[in-house]
Image (cartoon, rainbow, N blue to C red):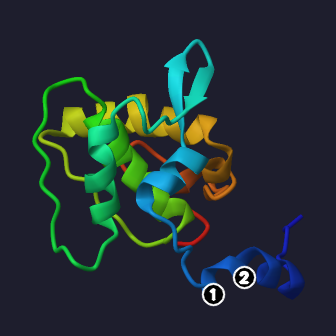
Amino acid sequence: MLNQETAKAARTDSGYILRAPRRMRVADAVAQYMRVPMGAGNSVPWDPLVAPYVIEPMNCLASREYDAVIFVGPARTGKTIGLIDGWVIYNVICDPADMLIIQMTEEKAREHSKKRLARTFRVSPEVVSRLSPNKNDNNVYDRTFLAG
């Protein structure tokens, strides 16, 4: 039997699309909503004190004063978690919009999607609640959220 959507349910489910974006700094939103997977099913909230030097560039990502943010830093110091994964979380929760992440190769894109984003989404309850329930909407290269 077909499962039909009622007008009331559609209005309830889509009401957040019409709301104005949340006005929070990117680093504050990431600290509040993002959990960092640690392995073995464990996760911890993102801590801005682990890599305090990425806070200012993170906040510049949503600023209208800048057209681009360029950050150069050493390897394995929290750049990707804060500046890329955190920016994705911010856009999913606070300012829903289409987003494209480009990696160097298809293999790197697959790795980032499966090992970083998918795991981060899975352990961050606010993000999980916004993922599209349709199986075809979420695969290695594409993620669709309720906001579109």
Inspect the image, locate mark 1, and give the three-letter code of the amino acid beneath it: Leu
- Residue 44 falls in which quadrant of the image? top right
Q: Which mark is residue 18?
A: 1
Please tell me how many numbered marks the rendered image carries: 2
Horizontal relation, residue 65 to residue 130: left or right: left
Horizontal relation, residue 35 to residue 114: left or right: right
Q: Which mark is residue 15?
A: 2
| Residue 49 picture location, percent across and down | 42, 33
Horizontal relation, residue 145 to residue 90: left or right: right
Horizontal relation, residue 117 to residue 22: left or right: left
What residue appears at the point 28 percent right and 79 percent down from the top-left corner?
64
Quote the CA–CA distance across marks 2 and 1: 6 Å
Is residue 143 in view?
A: no
Q: Residues within 10 Å of mark 1 (few under 14, many from 20)?
A: few
Element marked by disc 2: helix
What residue appears at the point 20 percent right and 52 percent down from the top-left corner?
102
Task: State the quadrant of the N terminus.
Answer: bottom right
| Residue 65 picture location, percent across and down | 22, 78
Q: State if disc 1 and disc 2 touch (CB < 8 Å).
A: yes
